[in-house]
């Protein structure tokens, strides 16, 4: 980021802790640290991809950034103002500026409301528009997202998954937000529909000048849509940087493992793979120090088990690995 330019949204040392189970006295039996001191910036006009295995904390972070949940520790700011702990009126105003597209297009829509009513709801809540203006805006939004007008009076169960997601997108952009948080918006759709929705999101972002957080476990999708990528593992960010740099030269062993897991149709693209050891640890009892050390082929038990690796700047990326220099030399054949 250029000096003097502040990010649109900033996540600073954010943790989210969930109680699990209960003791005989009613207290929590365990505590899961779904997010562990996560820090990142969302820049104006960019698309930030969040990737990682299921359970790494991507969706939890997305919900915090849209204020559907509050951090246990740390803080999130939007346009240099705190996002959590706001009075109801101020939070309502912020919700117009930060909207979300959910993973399940059917579950995200009220089954008792037509597509027209779902799109109209944020217009009535946030804009103060009259009935005639709302109806005109609904028709305009339907055209923008490629939803035929005759589908507007249908209920979610009468629509396909792709059509429901178009309704969700229209609803999210209806009030003119600054940020869209897209939580795996194409993972529940047929492959034939995914490209249409992705291209639609890119076109809407370009036309409206939006910033976007795009959550996905599909690296090919992220490489297509994101300007920067943050790689998460068990509640922590292990690598973050420009998409082209991360995909061309992944430095963290976990990032390399994720990219090596992507199938290659041609033998020339298959090459040597980074093999992770063991199983994904339980988030209730993650390894001490570096969370990835129990699966990392380069881990040093005494070093990696004793210290939480900080994010270190290398080029335009940041990597959290205590053995980064040794791994770099090893890969270079030195």
Image (spheres, helix red, strand yellow):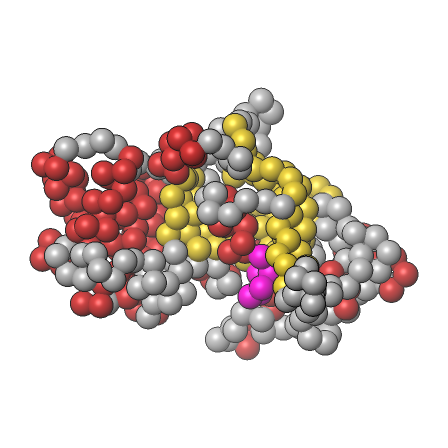
Seen in the picture, residue 217 relative to 177 is either above or below; the reply is below
Furthest residue in direction front, as rendered: 25
Q: Residue at x 54, y 54 (%)?
A: 60
Seen in the picture, residue 181 relative to 43 is either above or below; the reply is below
**What main secondary structure does the magenta stretch of the protein show?**
loop
Q: Position of residue 34 (x, y in %)?
A: 62, 56
Which residues are drawn in magenta? 52-57
Residue closer to the observer: 282 or 232: 282
Residue closer to the observer: 156 or 220: 156
In the image, taking residue 34 as reference, residue 177 lies left or right, namely: left
Residue closer to the observer: 137 or 216: 137
Quarter holding the C terminus is bottom right
Magenta stretch: residue 16 in it? no
Q: Residue at x 51, y 63 (%)?
A: 217
- Asked where in the image residue 104 lies, by quadrant, the reply is bottom left
Seen in the picture, residue 44 relative to 142 is either above or below; the reply is above
Magenta stretch: residue 53 in it? yes
Furthest residue in direction top, as rendered: 4
Q: How many marks?
A: 0
Quarter holding the N terminus is top right
Q: Residue at x 86, y 63 (%)?
A: 300
Q: Position of residue 99 (x, y in %)?
A: 38, 43
Q: Residue at x 19, y 50 (%)?
A: 117
Q: Position of residue 242 (x, y in %)?
A: 56, 46
Q: Position of residue 12 (x, y in %)?
A: 63, 38
């Amino acid at each position: 980021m250029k000096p003097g330019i502040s990010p649109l949204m900033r996540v600073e040392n954010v943790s989210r802790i969930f109680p699990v189970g209960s003791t005989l006295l009613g207290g929590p039996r365990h505590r899961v640290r779904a997010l562990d001191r996560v820090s990142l910036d969302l820049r104006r006009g960019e698309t930030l991809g969040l990737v990682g295995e299921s359970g790494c904390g991507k969706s939890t972070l997305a919900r915090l950034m849209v204020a559907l949940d509050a951090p246990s520790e740390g803080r999130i700011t939007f346009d240099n103002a705190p996002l959590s702990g706001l009075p109801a009126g101020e939070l309502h105003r912020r919700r117009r500026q930060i909207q979300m597209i959910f993973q399940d297009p059917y579950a995200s829509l009220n089954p008792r409301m037509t597509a027209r009513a779902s799109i109209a709801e944020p217009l009535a809540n946030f804009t103060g528009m009259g009935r005639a203006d709302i109806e005109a805006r609904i028709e305009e939004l339907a055209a923008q997202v490629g939803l035929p007008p005759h589908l507007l009076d249908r209920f979610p169960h009468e629509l396909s998954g792709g059509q429901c997601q178009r309704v969700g997108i229209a609803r999210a952009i209806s009030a003119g937000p600054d940020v869209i948080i897209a939580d795996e918006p194409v993972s529940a759709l047929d492959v034939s529909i995914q490209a249409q929705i992705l291209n639609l999101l890119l076109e809407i972002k370009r036309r409206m000048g939006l910033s976007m957080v795009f959550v996905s476990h599909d690296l090919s999708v992220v490489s297509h849509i994101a300007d920067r990528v943050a790689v998460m593992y068990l509640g922590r960010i292990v690598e973050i940087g420009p998409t082209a740099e991360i995909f061309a030269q992944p430095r963290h062993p976990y990032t390399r493992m994720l990219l090596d897991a992507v199938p290659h149709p041609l033998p020339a693209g298959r090459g040597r793979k980074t093999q992770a050891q063991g199983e994904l640890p339980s988030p209730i009892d993650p390894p001490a120090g570096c969370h990835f050390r129990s699966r990392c082929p380069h881990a040093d038990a005494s070093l990696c088990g004793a210290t939480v690796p900080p994010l270190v700047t290398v080029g335009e990326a940041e990597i959290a690995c205590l053995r980064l220099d040794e791994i770099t030399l090893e890969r270079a054949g030195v």
